[in-house]
């Protein structure tokens, strides 16, 4: 199951700073899914695996942009994202005995053949914020120079456990947290040769925050990724 709502608010202010537009985009989304597999592919419930996932997230982005008719066009913005997510990998297993197989048709008798459940439940909470700005200056009617920068900060909290029949077998639930920050600039030069032909060159830096893996068991977070791209 999944659902959500989103909305956009726009306010034009022609008499402020030579004409600007304020825009806010917000959304809420919730999902609840589960995948299940019959691993033994037989009529007996020997081994079934499952992968449930739940997520609830909120997102908000606000920008303030200048009137596009000016020689210098600029944009300032802020971004926020929050997500509470949980997932698990687990399986139900029937003991492989002849008594179990006889008792499993049509349904297993738990008194004769108890079905064991094992699972690796995890939770992950994300808080991400960013602030950004960009400006484009028209050097001539054909030549433009654009420069921008974004500051991103992301924090994640993670828990991991191992359960048998719903009871943890670890001494303590594993709890970890980490955060990452990055400055990511971009630069663009474009030249409009004719109406339908443009030349441009760009350089930009990308950032992807670190993460925690399924059934992490104290291995720590994966390192963030950084990339310079050129066109």
Image (cartoon, helix red, strand yellow):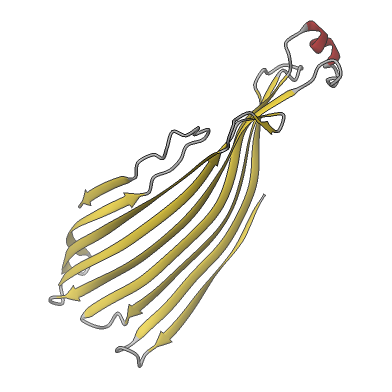
Residue 84: x and y in percent read 56, 52
Please indicate, yes or no, whether residue 180 appears anywhere in the rendered image: yes
Q: Quadrant of residue 119?
A: top right
The image shows a total of numbered marks equal to 0
Tell me the residue at 82%/8% (across/down).
99
The answer to whether residue 49 is visible is: no
Up/down of 205 relative to 145, above or below = above
Of 109 and 48, nearer the camera is: 109
Residue 61 appears left or right of 191: right
Q: Residue furthest top?
A: 98
Q: Which one is nearer the viewer's eye here, 190 or 81? A: 81
Percent position (x, y) of residue 24?
A: 47, 74
Q: Residue at x 21, y 68 (%)?
A: 146
Question: Residue 114: image x %, image y %?
Answer: 79, 20
**Residue 165 in the image: above or below residue 144:** above
- Tell me which residue sits at (84%, 10%) in the image: 102
Residue under the point 38% across and 63% down: 130
Question: Left or right: where does residue 13 sit relative to residue 51?
Answer: left
- Residue 90 versus residue 212 in the image, above or below: above
> How far across and down, in percent of the image, does residue 25 sit?
48, 70
Considering depth in this image, is 175 or 78 the residue closer to the camera? 175
* Outermost residue toward the bottom in this view: 15
């Amino acid at each position: 199951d999944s659902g959500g709502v989103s909305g956009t608010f726009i306010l034009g202010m022609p008499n402020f700073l030579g004409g600007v537009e304020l825009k806010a985009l917000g959304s809420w989304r919730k999902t609840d899914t589960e995948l299940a597999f019959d691993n033994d592919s037989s009529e007996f419930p020997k081994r079934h695996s499952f992968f449930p996932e739940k997520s609830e997230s909120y997102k908000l982005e606000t920008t303030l942009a200048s009137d596009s008719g000016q020689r210098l066009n600029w944009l300032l913005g802020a971004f926020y994202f929050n997500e509470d997510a949980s997932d698990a990998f687990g399986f139900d297993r029937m003991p492989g005995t002849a008594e179990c197989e006889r008792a499993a048709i049509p349904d297993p008798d738990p008194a004769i053949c108890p079905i064991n459940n094992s699972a690796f439940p995890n939770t992950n909470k994300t808080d991400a914020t960013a602030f950004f700005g960009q400006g484009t200056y028209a050097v001539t009617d054909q030549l433009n120079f654009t420069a921008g920068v974004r500051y991103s900060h992301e924090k994640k909290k993670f828990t991991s456990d191992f359960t048998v029949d719903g009871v943890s077998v670890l001494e303590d639930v594993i709890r970890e947290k980490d955060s990452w920050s990055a400055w990511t600039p971009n630069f663009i030069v474009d030249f409009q040769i004719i109406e339908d032909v443009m030349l441009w060159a760009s350089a930009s830096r990308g950032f992807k925050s670190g993460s925690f893996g399924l059934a992490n068991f104290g291995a720590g977070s994966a390192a963030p990724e950084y990339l310079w791209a050129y066109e």
